[in-house]
């Protein structure tokens, strides 16, 4: 909201970023976001960044399990 | 051999076969279970203990799993409950967390720290290292992190996350949104303030 009490379209677009990427917006909201993004490189860059960031965090978080742990888990199986 | 003896032997053999299948299916998910455990826990050692406890409990109570339902979610449910039982919950409640910055905060902070006036997204992203992401994730308070880890790393749906954590789906969504913002704030602090 700016000093005139009018909502800044980029602020509104920022609010819609997560629900947009999560496909939670209604059709009307999605169209509103996309129409703003089409004309606003400021928001567009930040949306693209968020998409890439999510992928980056997911990949960064992958940590290989110690093979010894796998063996320990297999040893927990019930003996036949 | 009587009919009833034969029937008992057949049931025993079937039970053993079902159990073997269950154990094999559960073990095939171990990498994914570990990946989530690693970020629910504070350290590699804690994660390894948690995964072992989870599998020990799962193998003991395999009969309570309904075949055809989501085994990965069932294992996660055991794991998150064990994690709570381990007394990990001595922390601030989500309601007392300070309000986090908006969703553009990280991009704005990172791009401000680059000499280029109008950097591209990839250039901004390159400011982050894998280690930064892991460190920032570990700094997100547990209630928020649990949801971020399940949805964004474990790739669970909101519905699955709600069932695993035994919280309403609306709570999953609000914690996920706030958790991601806190993560970005932590990343900004880690990278820009070093």
Image (cartoon, coloured by chain):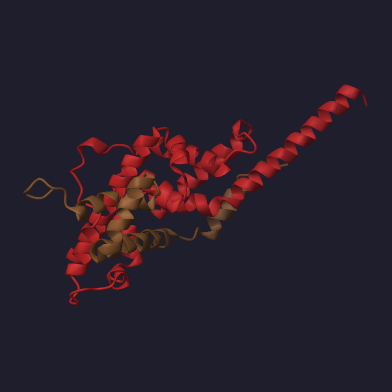
Chain colours: A brown, B red
- Residue A41 location (% of width, % of height): 26, 66
Give the percent coordinates (x, y) of residue B66.
62, 34
| Residue pictured at 30% horizontal, 53% vertical | A33
**Rendered residue at 39%/32% (across/down):** B168
The answer, for residue B46, to whether it is visible in the render is no
Q: Nearer the viewer, residue A77 or A22?
A: A22
Closer to the camera, A75 or B135? B135
Residue B3 appears in the figure = yes
Say which residue appears at 30% left-offset and 51% top-offset: A32
Kindly indicate the quadrant of the structure image that contains residue B104: bottom left
Q: Looking at the image, which is closer to me, B115 or B53?
A: B115
Residue furthest out toward the left: A3
Image x and y of residue B50, in percent: 46, 45
B34 vs B127, left or right, is: right
Q: Quadrant of the N terminus of chain B?
A: top right
When the figure is inspected, residue B189 is found, relative to residue A12, above or below; the finding is below
């Amino acid at each position: 909201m700016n000093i005139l009490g009018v909502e800044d379209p980029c602020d509104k677009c920022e609010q819609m970023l997560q629900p947009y990427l999560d496909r939670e917006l209604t059709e009307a909201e999605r169209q509103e976001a996309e129409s703003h993004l089409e004309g606003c490189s400021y928001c567009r860059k930040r949306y693209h960044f968020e998409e890439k960031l999510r992928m980056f965090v997911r990949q960064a978080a992958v940590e290989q399990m110690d093979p010894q742990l796998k063996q320990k888990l297999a040893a927990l199986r019930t003996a036949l | 051999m009587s009919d009833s003896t034969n029937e008992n032997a057949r049931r025993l053999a079937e039970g053993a076969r079902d159990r073997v299948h269950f154990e094999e299916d559960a073990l095939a998910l171990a990498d994914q279970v570990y990946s989530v455990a690693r970020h629910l826990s504070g350290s590699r050692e804690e994660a390894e203990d948690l995964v072992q406890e989870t599998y020990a409990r799962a193998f003991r109570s395999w009969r309570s799993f309904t075949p055809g339902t989501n085994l990965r979610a069932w294992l996660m449910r055991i794991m998150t409950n064990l994690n709570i039982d381990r007394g990990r919950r001595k922390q601030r409640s989500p309601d007392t967390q300070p309000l986090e910055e908006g969703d553009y905060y990280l991009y704005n902070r990172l791009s401000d720290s680059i000499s280029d006036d109008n950097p591209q997204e990839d250039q901004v992203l390159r400011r982050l290292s894998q280690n930064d992401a892991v460190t920032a994730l570990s700094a997100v308070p547990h209630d928020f992190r649990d949801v971020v880890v399940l949805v964004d790393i474990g790739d669970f749906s909101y519905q699955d996350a709600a069932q695993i954590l035994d919280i309403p789906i609306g709570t999953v969504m609000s914690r996920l949104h706030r958790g991601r913002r806190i993560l970005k704030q932590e990343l900004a602090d880690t990278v820009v303030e070093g």
